[in-house]
Amino acid sequence: MSAPALFLVLLAASSASAESFKSWAARASREEREKDDSAAARSYSNALSSWKESDGRLARAKVFCARGALMEKAGADAEAIKDYSECLATDAKNAKVFHRRGLLRLKSGGTALAIDDFYQAVKADVRFAQAYADRGRAYASQGEKDFAREDHQRACELGVKASCADRKRKTAAASDPPEPKTAARPRFSDCLRGLERCAEAGRAFGPCIDAAPSCAKKAVKGCCPDACRGAYRRELDRGLSEAAAYREVFAPGAKCATAP
């Protein structure tokens, strides 16, 4: 091979390895359109390796999202979750990606984490019908029937037909003659539902918990156990954020809500 030809080969090789983040991302997008998913995934990986601060963090997040979708499509759920998490670390209001990660977590048995993702999805987009439906499905799998019913009702109102069918079945079951009941204890699910409504209205977790009725003072619907309030404060003292402490303590099946 002549020297000029050898130079051109070396130049082509070096220019390929030295491509910019933007050019790799554009190549990956083109390969996706051409249905070459494996090549697109490699190009997205090269884009991430080439990324510089000047390329912008949001652009990097979009590449993580795109590669995560390819990983999910290929059945590599764990890798997809990692990419979605990297994406959400920057693009924290991406309702669709929260929903996708939630579905993968639900599929792998991480129901509590999935519920948290679906919550974030509807927080970012209050009309995200399928996120309500899937959160209702997750709640139902944990036996939280009240939460599940509310989410399916909301999903039905937003046009998810499957949730409407589920709602009709629940209504039909509720029409059966009720069994005699003794005086009911306050339900922790009512406490959680009240706190969730408060948070969805835009208030911080701490004020929502402080404003909730105390079951020790008056056992009314929606009251929250003092043991859980205390556990929440202890988590704050450990250095957790309000949101992290809330998720740690105020979750379905929490130990602090179990009567001694």
Image: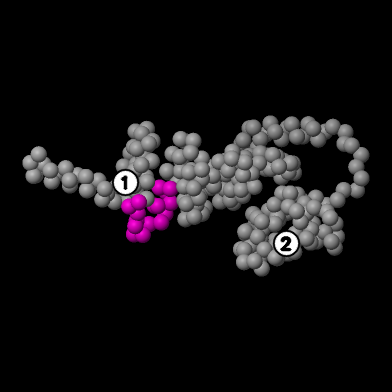
Instruction: Please give the name of the residue rendered at 61% of the width and 48% of the height, measured from the top-left corner.
Output: 113
Membership of 53 in magenta stretch: yes
**Disc assigned to residue 93:** none
Residue 107 found in image quarter: top right
* SS majority, magenta: helix
* Image spot of residue 3 (x, y percent): 8, 44
Give the secondary structure at mark 2.
Answer: helix
Looking at this view, is 109 or 185 the one in front? 109
From this viewpoint, is residue 206 visible? Answer: no
Query: Which numbered disc, 1 or 2, marks the residue closer to the eye?
Result: 2
Instruction: Please give the name of the residue rendered at 90% of the width and 42% of the height, measured from the top-left corner.
Output: 181
Which residue extends farthest front? 1
Q: Is residue 67 left or right of residue 116?
A: left
The magenta span reads 49-64
Q: Is residue 81 left or right of residue 41?
A: right
Instruction: Please give the name of the residue rendered at 56% of the width and 51% of the height, measured from the top-left corner.
Output: 124
At label 1, the amino acid type is Trp
- In this figure, which residue is indicated by the disc labeled 2? 231
* Image spot of residue 176 (x, y percent): 84, 32
Q: Quadrant of the N terminus?
A: top left
- In this figure, which residue is indicated by the disc labeled 1? 24
Q: Is residue 30 left or right of residue 201?
A: left
Instruction: Please give the name of the residue rendered at 16% of the width and 42% of the height, measured from the top-left corner.
Output: 9
Callout 1 touching callout 2 (CB < 8 Å): no
* Mark 2 crowdedness (10 Å alpha carbons): few <14, some 14-19, many ≥20: some
The disc, 1 or 2, on the residue closer to the chain's N-terminal end is 1
Give the secondary structure at mark 1.
Answer: helix
* Image spot of residue 200 (x, y percent): 64, 54
Report how many numbered discs are placed on residues in the image.
2
Q: Quadrant of the C terminus?
A: bottom right
Membership of 11 in magenta stretch: no
At label 2, the amino acid type is Ala
